[in-house]
């Protein structure tokens, strides 16, 4: 499998995972099928749109190609019909979020590196790609964005993007580096929730 195909598959996976998480939030909020699809599409594509706009890749891929909106809409339809099955997972939104977070952090960082950004900017853009969909989802659902208050969230995306950027100069092939970095970000996010890891807060709270 070529690197281009692999990173396309990462984008598809991230879009579907975030779309599904957005749809599940919409269902919990009691929205109808249209609202579910809107929230799924917004959550699944917002990070990629932000990345493309900042890189000057316009119009963004989500508006230029059919697949991003189609994948996000498919995630919304799946959630609509199979919400009961998905809810059997423990904290499904968090798990889906963790998948999308890791995938988009690495995919965003990779695209930024290919566009010629140095590693600090590429890592930052990877983080912005990873958190963009979740932020928009929470705002649209009238919730405080998780990135502002939940256990290790943006930090997990930062770790994944940084790990990927660090592996390449060491000669690690792109695909294994990406898989390892995605796993790291996912594991950090899930472990932070499982064990209650938190960053320091004002007043020691």
Image (cartoon, rainbow, N blue to C red):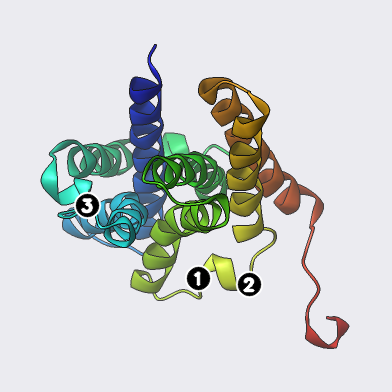
Q: Could you tell me how far apart the alpha carbons at marks 3 and 1 are, in whole angstroms? A: 20 Å
Q: Could you tell me how far apart the alpha carbons at marks 1 and 2 are, in whole angstroms? A: 7 Å
Disc sitting over residue 149 in the figure: 2
Disc sitting over residue 191 in the figure: none
Q: Residue at x 14, y 50 (%)?
A: 63
Residue 153 is at least partly visible in this image: no
Sequence-first disc among 3 and 2: 3
Sequence-first disc among 3 and 1: 3
Determine contact: label 3, label 1, CB under 8 Å: no
In-front residue for pair 115/187: 115
3 vs 1, front mark: 1
The residue at which mark 3 appears reads as: 37
Name the element at disc 3.
helix
Tell me if mark 2 has few (under 14), some (14-19) or many (20+) residues whose alpha carbon lies within 10 angstroms of its own: few
In the image, residue 158 lies at what x, y percent? Answer: 62, 53
How many numbered circles are shown?
3
In the image, residue 152 lies at what x, y percent? Answer: 69, 58
Residue 45 is at least partly visible in this image: yes
Disc sitting over residue 145 in the figure: 1
In the image, residue 145 lies at what x, y percent? Answer: 50, 70
Tell me if mark 3 has few (under 14), some (14-19) or many (20+) residues whose alpha carbon lies within 10 angstroms of its own: many
Determine contact: label 1, label 2, CB under 8 Å: yes
Q: Report the quarter where the C terminus lies.
A: bottom right
């Amino acid at each position: 499998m070529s690197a281009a195909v692999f990173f396309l598959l990462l984008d598809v996976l991230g879009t579907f995972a975030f779309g599904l998480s957005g749809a599940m939030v919409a269902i919990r909020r009691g929205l109808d099928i249209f609202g579910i699809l809107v929230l799924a599409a917004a959550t699944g594509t917002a990070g990629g749109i932000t990345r493309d706009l900042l890189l000057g890749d316009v119009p963004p891929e989500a508006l230029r190609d059919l697949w991003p909106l189609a994948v996000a809409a498919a995630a919304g339809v799946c959630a609509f019909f199979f919400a009961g099955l998905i809810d059997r997972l423990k904290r499904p939104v968090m798990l889906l979020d963790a998948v999308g977070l890791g995938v988009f952090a690495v995919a965003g960082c990779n695209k930024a590196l290919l566009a010629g950004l140095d590693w600090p900017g590429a890592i930052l853009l990877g983080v912005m790609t990873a958190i963009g969909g979740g932020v928009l989802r929470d705002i649209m659902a009238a919730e405080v964005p998780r990135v502002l208050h939940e256990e290790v969230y943006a930090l997990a995306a930062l770790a994944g993007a940084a790990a990927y950027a660090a592996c390449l100069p060491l000669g690690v092939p792109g695909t294994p580096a990406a898989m390892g970095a995605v796993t790291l970000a996912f594991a950090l996010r899930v472990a932070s929730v499982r064990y209650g890891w938190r960053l320091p807060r004002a007043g020691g709270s």
